[in-house]
Image (spheres, rainbow, N blue to C red):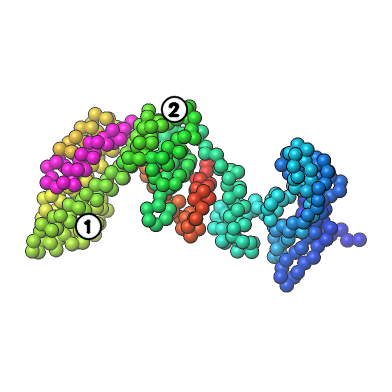
Amino acid sequence: MSVLSIRPYLPFCRVRIVGQSVSAREEIAWIKAEPDARYCPVCHVCGQAAAGVHSWDRRLLRDLNLGAARVWINCRYRKIRCRRCRSFRVEDLEFFDPYQRVTRRLARYIYELCKVLNIQEVADHFALDWKTVKRVDQTFLEQAFHRTDYDGLRILAVDEVAVKKGHNYMTVVLDHETGRVVWLGKARTAETLEAFFDGMTTEQKAAIEAVAMDTWDPYIKAVRKHVPHAKIVFDMFHVVQAFGRVIDKVRRSEYHKASGGDKEVFKGARYLLLANRKNIRRPKARAHLNKLLALNETLSTVMILKDLLKTIWRYRSRWWAERRLREWCILARTVDHPDVQKFARTLERYQYGLLNHCDYPIHTGRIEGVNNTIKVIKRKAYGFHDERYFSLKVIQAFATN
């Protein structure tokens, strides 16, 4: 008598296997299952034993592949009367969830694969519809990350990331100490960031000490409203980047003032002026930059200002940092250009965030790296139409446990 059996491959306690067939040409295995009479049917919601059976039904479920064969389980099940729920419920057979078309173990495997592959690749692998794969993955993500984890937050970094063309952004909130993405919200308005703070308790808000960001007024407004005690720290990268745009405006205006052969020196110099001098290694490029700075005193001055601007973030003493900032603004006002003087006024208006760097030497560099990873997630999936699902995928990618 043969002892070979497929039963060990289908370790489902509450059902018994009553039939099987294999289509070798299509590489499909069909399994028939029905409830085991030794077990009393129970409610899938509360676990209460059934008061009675209302009706019988069938469901076709996809299971893990067995070798090269795709396994389908044709399972009978009962709809029962539950006294506790006071309703008719599908009985719990422990290996599939009501209204799902895949078994629990296949759903878990799909979820694990979706961590490294995009939805369409997983769907192609199992010959499933991509919407089924997405629904399975999102169900697990909602179970794991449906609640925003505010625990242990002390220092935050806030920035926006572009998700679609046409200035469509999402706000990203990062735990600066662990690198964990805490929250994502649609748009980059004050209301967006306020929605993040609205979910925090009074004690959790009190624990926030500092927030790193760029000089974006809506974010500043939200932080001051909800955590007014927290110190706002402006990042060097964004400030220097903003001054780079000022330098380019100066270059264009000086080009129009130049005459004759001097105009040729300005051509091709845009990125030479924006780059760090130490990164300009080609002798021809360095010679071009030196010739331009020797020719134009205004550009030479703004280049000195760019180098001096970066030194403000090197100080750990607020007194010295404030002194350097004041000296920078005095020098900037010697440049006869409206954009340079406007930038000096902007620095004076936001100097509190520049000086707070002395107390909390943090920056948004970490969140810029996070934004690059977010863009990879988006690009790998060829974009996301469901922003909630996109948010859950990003939070999962940076989860610390």
Taken as a whole, is the magenta stretch helix, strand or loop? Answer: helix
Kindly tell me whether residue 89 is visible in this rendering: yes
Who's the residue at 74% across and 56% down the image? 59
**Magenta stretch holds residue 355:** yes
- The quarter of the image holding the C terminus is top right
Looking at this rendering, what residue extends furthest in the left direction? 260
Kindly tell me whether residue 176 is visible in this rendering: no
> In this image, 146 relative to 194: left or right?
right
**Residue 203 screen position, x and y as percent:** 48, 27
- Residue 270 disc label: 1
**Magenta stretch holds residue 264:** no
Distance CA(mark 1)–CA(mark 2): 46 Å
Report the front residue among 327 and 278.
Answer: 327
Looking at this rendering, what residue extends furthest in the right direction? 1
Amino acid type of the residue that numbered disc 2 sits on in the rendered structure: Ala
Image quadrant assignment for residue 265: bottom left
Report the front residue among 99 and 22.
Answer: 99
Q: Which portion, as a residue range, is magenta?
A: 331-360
Disc nearer the start of the sequence (1/2)? 2
Q: Name above or below for residue 225 compared with residue 374.
A: above
Q: Name above or below for residue 82 compared with residue 263.
A: above
